[in-house]
Image (tube, rainbow, N blue to C red):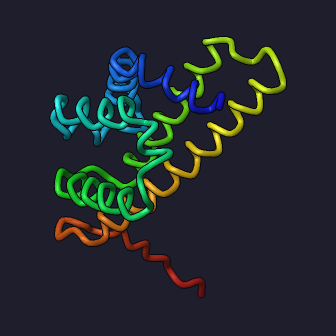
Amino acid sequence: MIALRLVHLIETHSDELTEGLVHKVLNSSRTTDLRKVPIEELRDRIHELLEHLSEWLLTKSNADIRKRYVQIGGRRAAQGVSVSDYCWAIFTVKEHLWDFLQRQGFLHSPVEIYGEMELLRLLDQFFDRAICYATEGYEQSDAWQPVVEVRAANP
């Protein structure tokens, strides 16, 4: 399975990918709240995901993903990280992984292109769930302060 080979490539390069992602997240104007997270914690969470990506994509159940990301969402809420910054960080991870795979130059045959498409589908499914479950964690947190927009009535 080509998608599995690509996942293993990500896992093999998890150290360098982690460092690149930590740099991107800490320096992006869209993820400034992630600076509130201790750098080692941020690094550990990213590395944990990338080093064990095949497990998260192929063997972990939906309940496993829910348990982990509700916990992370609650923790980020307690740290004062906005939901939007957290979502942008997840998007940054996906984009960084996709850029890495494209730099590897695997788009030579239809089978390899299909493998990348399958991996992209798996990544999208996983990260979409991670965002939704982390949002549940935010909502369940005592620190959660939803933004309420007040609009003036038109006379």
Asked whether 104 or 32 is in front, the reply is 104
Q: Is residue 52 left or right of residue 106?
A: left
Q: Is residue 40 left or right of residue 49?
A: left
Asked whether 34 or 67 is in front, the reply is 67
Relative to 122, residue 73 above or below: below
Asked whether 144 or 106 is in front, the reply is 106
Of all residues, the one furthest to the bottom in this rendering is 155
Identity of the residue drawn at 38% across and 46% down: 85
Relative to 19, residue 39 above or below: below
Q: List x then y, in percent, for residue 92.
A: 48, 34
Locate the N terminus by quadrant: top right
Identity of the residue drawn at 25% across and 29% down: 43
Locate the C terminus by quadrant: bottom right
Identity of the residue drawn at 40% across and 33% down: 29
Q: Is residue 123 left or right of residue 51?
A: right
Asked whether 54 or 32 is in front, the reply is 54
Answer with the quarter of the image where residue 119 lies.
top right
Q: How many marks?
A: 0
Identity of the residue drawn at 45% across and 49% down: 59
Answer with the quarter of the image where residue 112 lies.
top right
Relative to 60, residue 100 above or below: above
Q: List x then y, in percent, for residue 9.
A: 50, 20
Q: Is residue 2 left or right of residue 75?
A: right
